[in-house]
Amino acid sequence: MVRAYIGIDVGSVSTNIIALDENNEVLFKLYERTNGQPLETIKKGLKKLKDELGKNIVVSGVGTTGSGRQLAGVMIGADIVKNEITAHAVATVHYVPDVRTIFEIGGQDSKIILIKDQMVVDFAMNTVCAAGTGSFLDHQAERLGIPIEEFGELALTSKNDVRIAGRCTVFAESDMIAKQQYGFSKADIIKGLCNALVRNYINNLGRGKKLEPPYVFQGGVAANVGIKAAFEREVGHEVIVPKYYNVMGAIGAALLAKEAVKEKGKTNFRGFDSLKTNFVPSSFICTGCSNMCEVIKVEMDGTPIAMWGDRCGMWTEKVKQAI
């Protein structure tokens, strides 16, 4: 039997699940489209993990991160629920101990994280502008009739520099259409788009920050060699793409779970049978004060087991005291 630590990163585009052994080697890796169904995607992913490893592992800890981390944490009995910045930083430092700057671009958001002496010293996150995210690149690849897997490779074949306006998705798309009408090749336009999106990323998230190597690029978009090359042109230095670039948040959550269990001596993992339980999420607006918080409630077989979203913590604490 192998002791395993599970990390779950629930995002709006993908849900990633990782199992690490005691030596932090990856036993299981899953990158699954969330498709707007985080509960079902988590259940499906953990069933795959159980089918593949269940008889050979003892789950010794579970950590969750991502925008759906609270829900996932309640569902499976997480030992730690951590924000994405910390989870990504922990995983990157594990693989590249001297990392100073992390570029992270996911399906619908992007982050920049600055590290010194293996600690986060600054960060910025963009959840408003979709320019450069995986969803935007998927859309452009589809519009140009190019498989997304070939998008970056095609950019590398370009011999010309075409400037694309990349400060927002609307400008970028309309400028690309204009350049197509001028007769530029798809390769030239894609290279121009990669350069524009990286320029936009650095100007927005890196503004005023001192970016230093080693640079690490991770998140689903790191598979795009065209974007990686554009980053290297922008910063004038090699950019490292780690082996598990698209599941680093989940790896960080698993590493943090291992630390949490080491401190408290036991895991809260509910067991794989908990996946059969009927979890029902709902929300309401609290009218207790002028903040009018949207409170998320999760019920298990009709009983509230978690609430969050209330700034004052009134509902959150009520549930904690009741269970």
Image (tube, grey):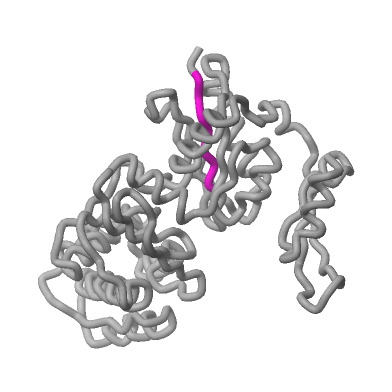
Instruction: Inspect this view and state whether residue 289 appears.
Output: yes
Place residue 255 in its image quadrant.
Answer: top left
Q: How many marks?
A: 0
- Which range of residues does the magenta coloring cover? 3-9
* Above/below status of 21 relative to 281: above
Q: Is residue 308 left or right of residue 19?
A: right
Queried whether the magenta region covers residue 4, the answer comes back as yes
Relative image position of residue 292 (x, y in whole percent): 79, 74
* Above/below status of 43 relative to 286: above
Residue that appears at 23% across and 87% down: 182
* Above/below status of 286 relative to 161: above
Q: Is residue 134 left or right of residue 192?
A: right
Relative image position of residue 174 (x, y in whole percent): 38, 85
Residue that appears at 43% across and 26% down: 27
- Quadrant where the C terminus lies? top right
Residue that appears at 56% across and 30% down: 261
Queried whether the magenta region covers residue 114, the answer comes back as no
User: Of 321 and 28, which appears nearest the observer?
Assistant: 321
Relative image position of residue 49 (x, y in whole percent): 54, 29
User: Of 319 and 73, which appears nearest the observer?
Assistant: 319
Residue that appears at 50% across and 12% down: 1
